[in-house]
Amino acid sequence: MTTNNKDKQTRDELWRVELRKAKKNKERTDIPRVRMNELDAAYRSRNREEVNLGLTAEQAVREAMRCLDCPNPSCMTGCPVGVEIPAFVKYIEAGRFLDAARTLKQTSALPAVCGRVCPQEKQCEAQCIHLKMKKEPVAIGYLERFAADYERESGQMSVPEVDSPNGMSIAVIGSGPAGLSFAGDMAKKGYEVTVFEALHEIGGVLKYGIPEFRLPNKIVDVEIDILTKMGVTFVSNCIVGKTITYEDLHADGFKGIFAASGAGLPNFMNIPGENLIGVMSSNEYLTRVNLMDAANPESDTPVLMGRNVAVIGGGNTAMDSVRTARRLGAERAIIVYRRSEEEMPARLEEVKHAKEEGVEFLTLHNPLEYLGDEKGHVRQMRLQKMKLGEADASGRRRPVAIEGEVETIDADEVIVSVGVSPNPLVPSTFAGLEVTRRGTIVVDETTMQSALPDVYAGGDIVRGGATVILAMGDGRKAAAAMDKALKGNA
């Protein structure tokens, strides 16, 4: 049964039919969209507590009432993992919060994570029928978070059913969202799944790349614990391609491999001064703070805590970095971005939160050079003023330098967040893979299968950069295709 058919079956159940009749559509669309409860900006900007506080049960039920329970739900077309959105939303309206959480888990391995960090405004909510009526979309992301959090806080965590063991072992390289999503689906299908993680913590980018004020580690740990209870084995401190090889995996009896090793290689701009002390990548900065306790002065790897911190870039990682700098005591924390604010790829919520927390936005500026003192520490940066020209391949207007307009500002720490490249280890050590010039693994877009028949891949190692939910969608596609191939060959 397909996901849409499952949702239709639930839609036809008496409780849901009666729920639809309880209110007219006009009454539902007239309900204003809920606003997320948040910590006070002045308080939160100096600590690492989670900013968003979630919805109360009353708020969640009222927001769920806004959903029209469409017969052909367009919201589902915007979800890369195929969550049965109307079903879980209507369970919330009916007060059946645990049923809502269980519905989410049928397709998503990480509902509490997705409810916090997915760009719903560009995916499921962007397809909501409310928008056609000039109304705000149903807050699907907030409701997903509510259901997942309710289940966890109730102490009644459900574990998805798994099929009987089929005797086949599968290896997963990387424990980020793509790897976890794939592992969950394969465990449900009866495979013995082992996830290999290079770092000492399981969770990949969910742990090292996203600060706790946006995604607490305890939330990720709960989702990983569910996968463990489903039979997934996790091996940390193991670098596939170095600690163990492709050949070792075969010798150990793994019948299929899913490469989800991410994009951990930072990009720089190759401008003068990038080697000065105090200039680092957002990847290094966030990993050290999030995973290595670097903000602790007694840490073995303390991170620099600048007073004037400039973050180069306009994506979510740049926002995470600049907001982290504020929490580590920066008196002035600045986003430097070469386009205008309208072109920023960061979520609107992240931009809003950053501004509330005192972050400055220096848009239409691009670094030319970093200037240091006699000891080699960065102290200033020269910025080229920009204007917007015609649209480029991304659909955004291209930044063009304004000749002769350069300014210098103080900066004793610079965090460069201009993108990442794929981790090169798997592409360089798995002989027979087809790799692009950018270092990404070439796969069939339908099956996620690589040129090596037993190797599938997804997430950043394929896309070069992806959202959590797109990476999870890759994992689900790969699991469905690998399962079909292995059972066809059995």
Image (tube, grey):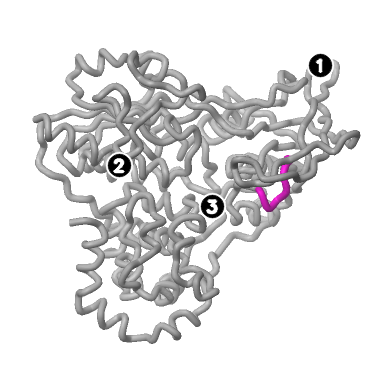
Q: Residues within 10 Å of mark 1 (few under 14, many from 20)?
A: few
**Residue 63: quadrant of the picture:** bottom left
Position of the C terminus by quadrant: top left
Name the kind of residue labelled 3 in the image: Glu
| Alpha carbon distance from label 1 to label 2 | 52 Å
Image point (46%, 24%), residue name: 436
Q: Which residues are magenta?
A: 336-343
Q: Position of residue 337 (x, y in %)?
A: 72, 41
Name the kind of residue labelled 1 in the image: Lys
The residue identified by callout 2 is 477
**Mark number, residue 50:** 3
The earlier-in-sequence mark between 3 and 2 is: 3
Secondary element under disc 2, as helix, strand or loop, is helix
Could you tell me if the residues under marks 1 and 2 are in contact, i.e. CB atoms within 8 Å?
no
Q: Position of residue 306 (x, y in %)?
A: 74, 34
Front in this rendered view, residue 73 or 186 = 73
**Mark number, residue 226:** none
Front in this rendered view, residue 43 or 223 = 223
Q: Position of residue 396 (x, y in %)?
A: 64, 46
Image point (38%, 19%), residue name: 239
Name the kind of residue labelled 2 in the image: Lys
Front in this rendered view, residue 254 or 375 = 254
The residue identified by callout 1 is 375
The earlier-in-sequence mark between 1 and 3 is: 3
**Residue 462: quadrant of the picture:** top left
- Judge whether 476 appears above or below 246 on screen: below
Could you tell me if the residues under marks 3 and 2 are in contact, i.e. CB atoms within 8 Å?
no
Position of the N terminus by quadrant: bottom left
Q: Residue 327, can we see it? A: no
